[in-house]
Amino acid sequence: MSTLEPERGTGTGTLVEPTPQVSHGDGDHERFAHYVQKDKIMASALDGTPVVALCGKVWVPGRDPKKYPVCPMCKEIYESMSAGGDGGKGGNGGNGGGKK
């Protein structure tokens, strides 16, 4: 007997289809330019090593970041770092070459 069918004699029921979850995972990161340390972007350009954005995205840069809006999570983290009195260390970089 299928788990989607009610048992006979138990009354009526309503089958509720699960609502698909909208993903905010890696796919959404592809739509943005991300903040990354400049020296990490240079190293990636030279040897192809992946970089890690402030928001946590890991990838090998290869696209022009000027064509994409800045990742809201990276921007929020970067602004909080600058306001925190740490001298603005950390987040310059981009989704392929250096977004400021």
Image (spheres, grey):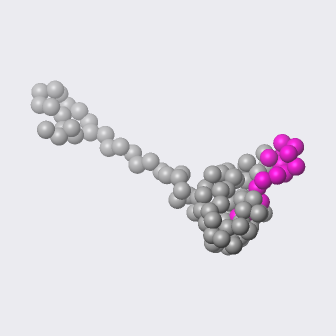
Magenta stretch, main secondary structure, is loop
The answer to whether one can see residue 67 in this image is no
In this orientation, does residue 91 appear?
yes
Q: Which image quarter holds the N terminus? A: top left
Taking the magenta stretch, the answer to whether it contains residue 84 is: yes
Image side of residue 14 versus residue 58, left or right: left
Q: Name the residue rendered at 49%, 52% in the picture.
A: 23
Residue at the top extreme?
10
Q: Which residue shows up at 21% across the image and 38% down it? A: 3
x and y percent of residue 46 in the render? 69, 73
Quadrant holding the C terminus: bottom right
**Residue in the foreground of this view, choosing between 42 and 27:** 42
Residue at the spot x=73%, y=68% of the render? 42
Q: Total label count?
A: 0
Q: Which residues are magenta?
A: 81-94
* Residue 30, position as x, y percentages in the image: 58, 63
Position of 84 with respect to 53 (left or right) is right
Instruction: Give the quadrant of residue 59.
Output: bottom right
Q: Is residue 28 magenta?
A: no
Q: Relative to 4, is 82 above or below?
A: below
User: Horizontal and vertical percent for residue 58?
Assistant: 60, 58
The x and y percentages for residue 57 are 61, 55
Q: Residue furthest front?
A: 47
Q: Tell me the quarter of the picture where residue 51 sits.
A: bottom right
